[in-house]
């Protein structure tokens, strides 16, 4: 996600088709020839060749280091965890053919299927133990290490307070991985489908610090595709992995992925037949094309477990004030933004957890949309606390990564804040990787980000703010009561009580406004008629192994 963020962290995803994140946009159009693999058919390309675009250069193609959505969309199709997610985002067997769970729900025993790496090496349980402990090793600075914290001893090791040997991950033999948890974790099998839980071929990558920097013999994968070529800031080419255990069910031979920062350019490429699909989780549908696609009845819209929000730097003099953050949050006209700018049937976000998540479907009523009077009252209190007399003396800078969509959203919010609050609002646009670094270094006041659920549970939207040290936080905010409620939720075995604890935690966070939720995403996409099974699940994932390209 990402902070190198995921949102989906929605990078590339941005607005509607988005979720990246992690949350995204960046990169130049590829000049690489695509003559390879073409035949003389009417379509001008091999029947099982798929052409796509993403919005930026992937910041990292290391499963344990990537946090953004651009990297994630590639990693999820070249690596495979113990489980994968079906169309309903439910876990099903993948690298593991089966598992047993102990009566106390603390011990998972996974049996690996007979599978090979792309270089022919067997995939063994030790490859999972190695990869997971590599992510937890504090020396490796994996920002997503916290997603492994449900495992016994994982957090202590990652924080430098425990040892690798004390972590509850053990390769019992080549085909048996035993995992012991700190507490029952109802979504653990969903976690094992996430990229940070992917294996690494220890024999190949150990001792090779930059094995993941380029395509080549050291970049071995266990998923349905291999990383055949990577022309930085231009294109990525995936090819079918002949050694994949389920290769007989993989139809695509080649996936060409160009990096096209401009949503408008990407839309034109789709209309011209240069790409086969446009939408999340690859590149967003351009704002200017949404109405056209709607009128043509080709636009697909589906709810997605993801949220678009503005993060506040709580260490900044101005945005460090909770009443100022409250004023900015309340003074956003979410429905107006959706109706006039994003146009993707998104839902106004009045909480941190999307309404697609089980137990959080209803409006929790933490605040009202476009509450200008409430915003003015909070602004008055904040100014009093800061010793500011005139709203014009409050200068707010909104930072976002390069994207027509993010720019349009920021301009809409800028206009509302200036008009209704009388403050001075500037806009700060940066290329994706530069933008991520600004967030990581707290070099911002207000920064946009999207968050796609790592798994279909409320905890994935709340956990990143458990401490200021969390790699995906960026706000600097933390709250002892919030952390306590999250910890209690991890120990609660009654599902209804657990959801209630998570709602209480959400209420604590929203009362201090470390983020301003803006809207819950919908997944917007268009796909040519001859491309089948190209559909995102509830978390915005697309399994390219299921895609079939029919001859035109």
Image (cartoon, rainbow, N blue to C red):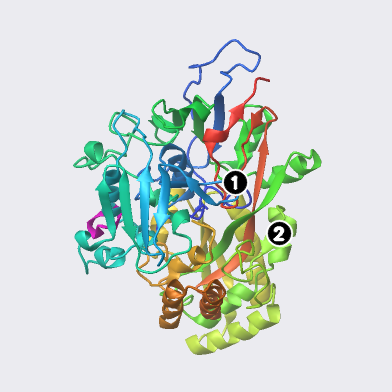
Q: Nearer the viewer, residue 8 or 166?
A: 166
Q: Residue at x 28, y 65 (%)?
A: 153
Mark closer to the chain start, 2 or 1: 1
Would you say 523 lies left or right of 198 here? right
Q: Nearer the viewer, residue 352 or 412?
A: 352
Measured as percent of width and height from the top left, residue 231 is found at: 40, 31
Give neighbour class at mark 2: few <14, some 14-19, many 20+ (Cα, 10 Å).
some
Which residue position holds label 2? 338
Mark 2 falls on what kind of element?
helix
**Magenta stretch: includes residue 336:** no
Which residue position holds label 1? 87
For the N terminus, the image quarter is bottom left
Do residues under tags 2 and 1 come within 8 Å of each other at their CB atoms? no
Picture quadrant of residue 412: bottom right
Q: Is residue 445 above or below residue 497?
A: above
Mark 1 falls on what kind of element?
loop
**Magenta stretch: includes residue 137:** yes
Q: Residue at x 25, y 57 (%)?
A: 137
For the C terminus, the image quarter is top right
């Amino acid at each position: 996600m990402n902070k190198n963020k995921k949102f989906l962290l929605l990078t590339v995803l941005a607005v509607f088709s988005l979720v990246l994140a992690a949350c995204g946009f960046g990169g130049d159009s590829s000049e690489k020839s695509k003559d390879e693999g073409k035949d003389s058919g009417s379509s001008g390309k091999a029947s099982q060749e798929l052409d796509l675009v993403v919005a930026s250069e992937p910041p990292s193609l290391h499963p344990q280091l990537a946090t953004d959505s651009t990297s994630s969309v590639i990693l999820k199709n070249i690596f495979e965890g113990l489980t994968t997610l079906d169309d309903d985002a439910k876990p099903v067997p993948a690298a593991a053919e089966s598992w047993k769970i102990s009566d106390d729900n603390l011990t998972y025993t996974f049996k690996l299927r007979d599978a090979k790496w792309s270089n022919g090496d067997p995939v063994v349980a030790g490859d999972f133990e190695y990869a997971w402990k590599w992510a937890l090793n504090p020396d490796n600075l994996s920002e997503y290490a916290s997603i492994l914290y449900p495992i016994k001893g994982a957090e202590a090791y990652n924080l430098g307070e425990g040892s690798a040997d004390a972590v509850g991950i053990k390769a019992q033999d080549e085909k048996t991985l035993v995992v012991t948890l700190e507490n029952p974790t109802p979504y653990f099998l969903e976690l094992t489908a996430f990229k940070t839980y992917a294996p690494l071929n220890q024999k190949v990558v150990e001792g090779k610090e930059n094995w993941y920097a380029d395509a080549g013999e050291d970049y071995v994968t266990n998923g349905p595709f291999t990383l055949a070529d990577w022309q930085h800031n231009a294109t990525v080419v995936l090819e079918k992995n002949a050694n994949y255990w389920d290769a007989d069910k993989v139809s695509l031979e080649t996936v060409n992925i160009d990096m096209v920062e401009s949503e408008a350019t990407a839309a034109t490429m789709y209309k011209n037949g240069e790409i086969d699909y446009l939408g999340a989780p690859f590149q967003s549908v351009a704002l200017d094309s949404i109405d056209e696609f709607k009128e043509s009845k080709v636009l697909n819209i589906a709810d997605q477990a993801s949220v678009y929000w503005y993060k506040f730097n709580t260490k900044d003099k101005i945005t460090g004030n909770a009443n100022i953050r409250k004023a900015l949050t309340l003074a956003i006209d979410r429905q107006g933004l959706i109706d006039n700018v994003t146009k993707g049937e998104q839902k106004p976000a009045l909480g941190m957890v999307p309404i697609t998540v089980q137990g959080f479907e209803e409006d929790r009523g933490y605040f009202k949309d476009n509450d200008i009077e409430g915003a003015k009252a909070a602004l008055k209190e904040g100014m009093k606390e800061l010793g500011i007399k005139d709203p014009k003396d409050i200068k707010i800078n909104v930072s976002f990564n390069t994207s027509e969509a993010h720019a349009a959203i920021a301009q809409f919010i800028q206009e509302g804040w200036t008009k209704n609050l009388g403050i001075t609002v500037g806009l700060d646009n940066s290329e994706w990787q530069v933008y991520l670094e600004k967030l990581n270094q707290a070099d911002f006041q207000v920064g946009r980000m999207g968050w796609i659920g790592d798994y279909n549970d409320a905890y994935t939207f709340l956990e990143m703010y458990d401490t200021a040290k969390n790699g995906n936080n960026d706000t600097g905010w933390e709250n002892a009561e919030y952390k306590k409620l999250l910890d209690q939720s991890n120990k609660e075995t009654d599902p209804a009580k657990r959801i209630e604890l998570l709602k209480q935690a959400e209420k604590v966070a929203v009362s201090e406004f470390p983020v301003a939720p803006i809207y819950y995403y919908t997944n917007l996409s268009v796909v040519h008629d001859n491309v089948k099974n190209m559909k995102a699940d509830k978390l915005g994932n697309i399994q390219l192994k299921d895609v079939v390209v029919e001859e035109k």
